[in-house]
Image: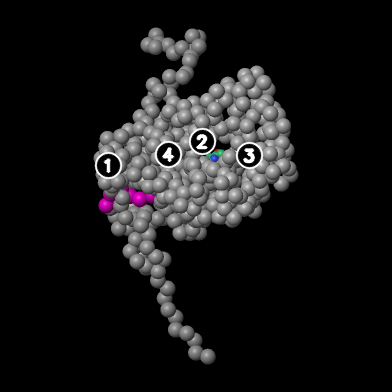
Amino acid sequence: MQKLKYERPFIRKMNIGSMNKFGTSSNVQPVKHIDGVPVASLLAQFGSPVFVLSERQIRRNYRAAARAFKTRYPRVQFAWSYKTNYLNAVCQVFHQEGSWAEVVSGFEYRKALGNGVAGNQIIFNGPEKRREDLLLAMENNSLIHIDNFDELFNLIELCNEVNIQPRVAIRVNMDTGVYPQWDRFGFNYENGQAWNAMGKIVASGKMQLVGLHCHIGTFMLSTAAYVVAAGKMCDLLMRCRTELQNPIQYLDMGGGFPSTNTLKGAYLPGVDTVQLVDDFAEAITTTILNFGFKQDELPLLILETGRALIDDAGYLLGSVVANKRLSDGRRAMVLNFGVNTLFTAFWYDHQISPAQDGSQHTEDVVLYGPLCMNIDMVRESAHLPLMEAGDNVVVHKVGAYNMTQWMQFITTRPAVVMIDEQGQPHQIRKPENLEYIEMMEQVPVHLEPVLNPPR
Ligand SMILES: *Cc1c(COP(=O)(O)O)cnc(C)c1O
């Protein structure tokens, strides 16, 4: 047999961003504008780093999602999940669009009242509702979603004290075929806990059981889980009508729809893999419509929308602090924001773009933040053109959970800007400063600093 001729292996440099056998990548394309506003001017005006939100994109997302549900089902109400992003300007955009408020603490509850949301349009969720919070919610005729038996018994006592009949629902958890099961919130369906709680509420005669609530997970990748959940909720609702003679007015199916971000460890980008709000709307509404309710007995369908409506409307603009070579030869870049500012870097491989024209040479690079800790990694590996200290970057899809979970660790939090529909930027949260951070501190007299100590 003739020996094959030796061919020398070779390595050929390829520029990502142009066509090659691995497809194209937009990472090298600089992003110089957001909604028509130059990135450079936003950084010059509001500092670096800075969060930027597109009001246009938030409204577009809201309207598309509302349409997906309202064209499939006759009675739909959205409630904005405050913990996803509770900057008042953001909440107002959702309230203007018609959203109620969904809150999970006394703090968020009061924020919703401050935003002018009518008490009867606030949904009060969460495992910890303090006595004064419950009283406030009862006085305002809000929807109180009970999480556990201790809360239920507290509420019965409160009802006796103040003689108000609150409108309540229970949070239900269940096996939806997605594991690990989310069973730490609410009453379980399979073991009968949920049914027992409903029986106790109705028997107490102290409250109106007006709804059933579930929130089966977050960044859910399967619409099938919602089919299971909606079926079990309908079953409870029907039994409540027939066996307890208690009409339930609404089914609150929670949130959990994914944004188009890419989860860490995912093989393909989120834009190519996650299901659309339309798919979730189809799964939920078809299940309820096919359950067998009479047309005039269809419950109001409430959705507590969060990340899917705002993630892609948010950007984080920042700057390169330094470039390095690591001991293993990898290139590393230090940015002026880390996981303190971009909390969701723990979950996502955020897409990051340069904000200016630059080198055609691209390379895998580790992106670090400025914190003095090892976990401060913005991306373990990103394919980016070389950038110099002082160059700027744009991080995409950061609108959800960053402006509520950001940490004030070793430095202050940046400004947040919203670009309105006419392309006008507005600062909606000032950058923090030392004075703001220290405003809450108190130093005992014997520890007060000695100014101008004697030498
Ligand atoms: C966080 C939360 C939501 C919103 O969740 P997303 O996954 O962002 O859609 C809705 N309902 C409840 C009870 C929540 O805790």
**Image coords of residue 261 (percent x, y):** 46, 51
- The residue shown at (68%, 32%) is 201
**Secondary structure under badge 2?**
strand
Q: Is the C-beta separation of discs 3 and 1 under 8 Å?
A: no
Look at label 2 and name its amino acid: Glu
Is 354 magenta? The answer is: yes
Can you see residue 216? yes
Q: Which residue is mark 3?
A: 247
The answer to whether the residue bearing label 2 lies less than 8 angstroms from the nearest atom of ligand 1 is yes
- The three-letter amino acid code for the residue at tag 3 is Pro
Question: Could you tell me which secondary element the residue under label 3 belongs to?
Answer: loop
Residue position for label 1: 423
Look at label 1 and name its amino acid: Gly
Q: Are marks 3 and 4 in contact (CB under 8 Å)?
A: no
The image shows residue 452, relative to residue 132, as above or below, that is above
**Which label is found at residue 273?**
none
User: Where residue 102 is drawn, which disc sits there?
Assistant: 2
Q: Position of residue 421 (x, y in %)?
A: 30, 42
Span of residues in magenta: 352-357
Residue 445 spot, x, y in % from top left: 49, 9
Q: Which mark is residue 98?
A: 4
